Image (cartoon, rainbow, N blue to C red):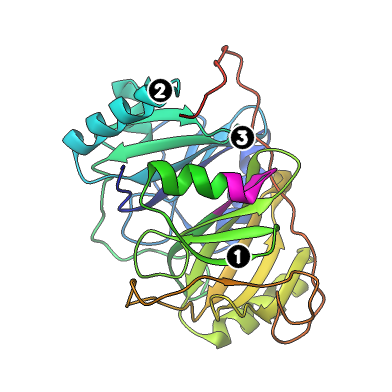
């Protein structure tokens, strides 16, 4: 069993780096780190060196990163995944530097989502220099797409320490790796992809202030404001450049008594099952994986 300690980052390929960075800073409010690598923009929301890396090139999600305890845990994870039939690649020193980690491995999940496990992600103690007062407190969670969410759960629970918190029928599986209701979600989609990237904010007022701000700047609101009954979080989803969906949310549930929690199942067609406030419900946009020129063998599962 591979123990994930946290989410680390999202890497996204963008054809127009300038536009994507402008949106991530001026609209979302993230801090842009100083330029140290041509064609890569590192964006910060909390104590991590960055949680979002925008990489100039072919448009599409490149990888979703998760942390493990240390180098020994990473090596053990590498062996476990290889024994299970996954094609695992260890990153070079240069690639690890781009991710601001000591080392990492990469592999594809059974659906084609590129996953990276990292050791020793860099921390910065200086307060984040947010570019607008959106109220962001941290990188909250990420959501992937897969054709079968139950099969996706078997992958994440069978190989990793992910536990289901709640089901939304066959439409979504919400999973935790710590007391937060979900750090990882998988939504039902035709193929692999990044459904959205979430940022927690300090108050419900921040959600509604951003709602007005986004409308004033002609940003496409995909869903919200609303409140999810599963996590109790007040949410707001909006679309950025190149099909990348961002989310602000406030008030996420914590599951402190892990043994006592029993996952619930919600019917996605039942009013209030997605938004307790009964607002319009929509499937948010997914950024599909960027094509990779090199040949990757299709992973198998044991």
Residue 100 visible in this rendered orientation of the protein: no
In front: label 2 or label 1 = 1
Q: Secondary structure at mark 1?
A: strand
Mark found first going from the N terminus, 3 or 1:
3
Q: Secondary structure at mark 2?
A: loop
For the residues labelled 2 and 1, the Cα–Cα distance comes to: 30 Å
Q: Is residue 139 magenta?
A: no
| Placement of the C terminus among the 4 image quadrants | top left
Q: Position of residue 190 (x, y in %)?
A: 76, 41
Q: Quadrant of residue 266?
A: bottom right
Is mark 3 in CB contact (under 8 Å) with mark 2? no
Is mark 2 in CB contact (under 8 Å) with mark 1? no
| Position above or below: 281 against 56 | below
| Placement of the N terminus among the 4 image quadrants | top left
In front: label 3 or label 1 = 1
- Residue corresponding to mark 2: 88
For the residues labelled 3 and 2, the Cα–Cα distance comes to: 15 Å
Residue 109 visible in this rendered orientation of the protein: yes
Observer-nearest residue: 131 or 156? 156
Residue at 55%, 15% in the rendered image: 297
Q: Which mark is residue 111?
A: 3
| Position above or below: 255 against 18 | below
Left or right: 289 in relation to 30: right
Residue at 67%, 45% in the rendered image: 148
Q: Is residue 144 magenta?
A: yes
Q: Which mark is residue 167?
A: 1
Left or right: 253 in relation to 143: left
Left or right: 209 in relation to 219: left
Magenta region: which residues? 143-151
């Amino acid at each position: 069993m591979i123990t994930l300690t946290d989410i680390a980052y999202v890497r996204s390929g963008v054809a127009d780096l300038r536009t994507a960075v402008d949106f991530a800073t001026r609209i979302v409010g993230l801090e842009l780190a100083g330029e140290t690598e041509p064609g890569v923009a590192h964006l910060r929301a909390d104590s991590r060196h960055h949680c979002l890396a925008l990489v100039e090139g072919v448009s599409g999600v490149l990888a979703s990163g998760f942390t493990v305890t240390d180098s020994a845990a990473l090596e053990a994870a590498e062996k476990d995944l290889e024994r299970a039939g996954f094609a695992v690649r260890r990153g070079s020193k240069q690639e690890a530097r781009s991710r601001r980690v000591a080392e990492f491995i990469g592999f594809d999940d059974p659906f084609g989502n590129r996953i990276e496990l990292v050791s020793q992600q860099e921390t910065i103690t200086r307060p984040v220099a947010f570019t607008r007062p959106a109220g962001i407190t941290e990188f909250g969670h990420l959501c992937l797409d897969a054709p079968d969410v139950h099969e996706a759960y078997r992958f994440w629970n069978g190989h990793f320490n992910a536990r289901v918190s709640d089901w939304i029928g066959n439409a979504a599986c919400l999973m935790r790796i710590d007391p937060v209701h979900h750090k990882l979600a998988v939504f039902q989609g035709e193929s692999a992809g990044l459904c959205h990237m979430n940022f927690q904010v300090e108050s419900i007022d921040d959600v509604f202030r951003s709602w007005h701000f986004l409308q004033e700047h002609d940003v496409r609101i995909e869903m919200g404001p609303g409140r999810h009954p599963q996590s109790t979080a007040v949410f707001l989803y909006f679309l950025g450049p190149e099909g990348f969906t961002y989310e602000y949310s406030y008030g996420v549930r914590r599951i402190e008594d892990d043994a006592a929690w029993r996952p619930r199942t919600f019917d996605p067609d039942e009013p209030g099952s997605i938004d307790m406030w009964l607002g319009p419900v929509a499937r948010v946009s997914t950024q599909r994986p960027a094509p990779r020129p090199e040949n990757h063998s299709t992973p198998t599962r044991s």
